Amino acid sequence: MGYVISTANMKGGVGKTTLSVNLATSLAKDHGKRVLVIDLDTQISATLSLMSPADFAKRRKGKRTLRYLVDQAIQSESQSKITTQDVIQSCVCKIEKLDLLPGDIDLYDEFVVSEMLHKQALSSEQFHFEKVWNRFERLLIGQILEPVFQNYDFIILDCAPGYNLMTRSALVASDLYLMPAKPEPLSIVGIQLLERRIAKLKESHDADGALEVEMLGVVFTMLGNLLTGRYYRQVMQRVNQDFGTERTFRTQIPNDVNVSKAVDSFMPVVLTNPQSAGAKAFTQLTEEFLQKLKVLLDNKEPRTKLKLTSWD
């Protein structure tokens, strides 16, 4: 059975999307896993790392992006019949087992969401806006995933920087999360902030027993010659103290211009230049990812069905 994995960090510019798409591609290409990437960031970087802008424009014109699935979830009276499978682009980058659910530059209107949830809270026997909001967070991404969950070994959710509604809903729907970070002192702040937010998220969802997400590990990205000295050692020491070596990936992703160049081809570097330093690091990271996953989950049952309940 499959696992839902979020890649998240409070800070932007830490290589989160690059990690998501290269990990997903390597899992499909090198390990024969069925993988779905879902782009939850309005910058649509994951989408444009796996398809051209022209192809994306066609799908958006045809209402085949994540936006329209989110619209249906928000507007329960919507007459649209778009399904999750309708939106998924199969065999992206000509990799048979690699699929993409494209994001959108405009995913939802916060005012519309708040208005809808306020009405639901008013119509309930007890006005409890926070409970209604938490239920919506729990169901938003979960309901989108449920129809296709059984089709994949891994569903990778590429979250936006920060801590918005989509990121919170993604974490609630996930089994595990990866935290990419640059080896700089300020990265510790981003790691700590996200961990505190997730702890609060677990607390707010505790009553429903809905949140079981665990960190799989911290992945250090964008290593260069300037980042191998005192600052780097300080960061590594602090991360090891906070999470232990078992939650810190040994494989680290170097600065490699080929990783940036790959974006021009709308393909991950593991496909465009598999012999480059960056591609080799992602390939090795994928192997370590599978090893860590096996160790962590050996004594656990895979999730067979997302925990969903109606919010009506």
Image (cartoon, grey):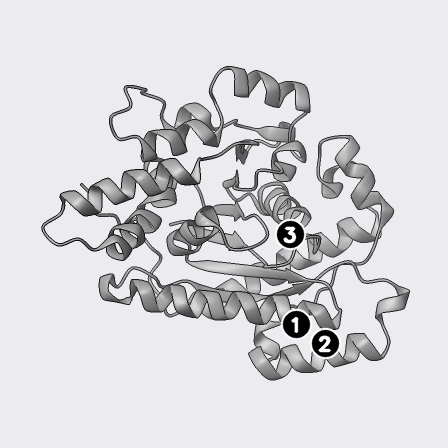
Please state which amino acid type lies under the numbered disc 3: Lys
Tell me which corner region of the image, top left, top right, bottom left or bottom right, holds residue 311. top left
Q: Could you tell me how many numbered marks the image carries?
A: 3
Give the percent coordinates (x, y) of residue 20.
Answer: 61, 48
Earlier in the chain: of badge 1 and badge 2, it is: 1
Give the percent coordinates (x, y) of residue 77.
Answer: 24, 26
For the residues bearing labels 1 and 2, Cβ distance under 8 angstroms: yes
Disc 1 vs disc 3: which is toward the camera? 1
Would residue 58 appear left or right of 135 to someone viewing this image?
right
* Mark 1 to mark 3 CA distance (whole Å): 15 Å
Tell me if mark 1 has few (under 14), some (14-19) or many (20+) residues whose alpha carbon lies within 10 angstroms of its own: some
Front one among 310 and 213:
310
Residue at 63% across, 42% down: 25
* Mark 1 to mark 2 CA distance (whole Å): 7 Å
Determine which residue is flagged by label 3. 16
Give the percent coordinates (x, y) of residue 33.
Answer: 52, 44
Residue at 56% across, 64% down: 291
Determine which residue is flagged by label 1. 188
Tell me which corner region of the image, top left, top right, bottom left or bottom right, holds residue 76. top left
Earlier in the chain: of badge 2 and badge 3, it is: 3
Earlier in the chain: of badge 1 and badge 3, it is: 3
Please state which amino acid type lies under the numbered disc 1: Ile
Please state which amino acid type lies under the numbered disc 2: Val
Dot 1: what SS? helix
User: Is 45 drawn above or below residue 160 in the view shown?
Assistant: above
The numbered disc on residue 235 is 2
Front one among 239 and 186:
186
Would residue 104 appear left or right of 309 to someone viewing this image?
right
Give the percent coordinates (x, y) of residue 23.
Answer: 62, 49
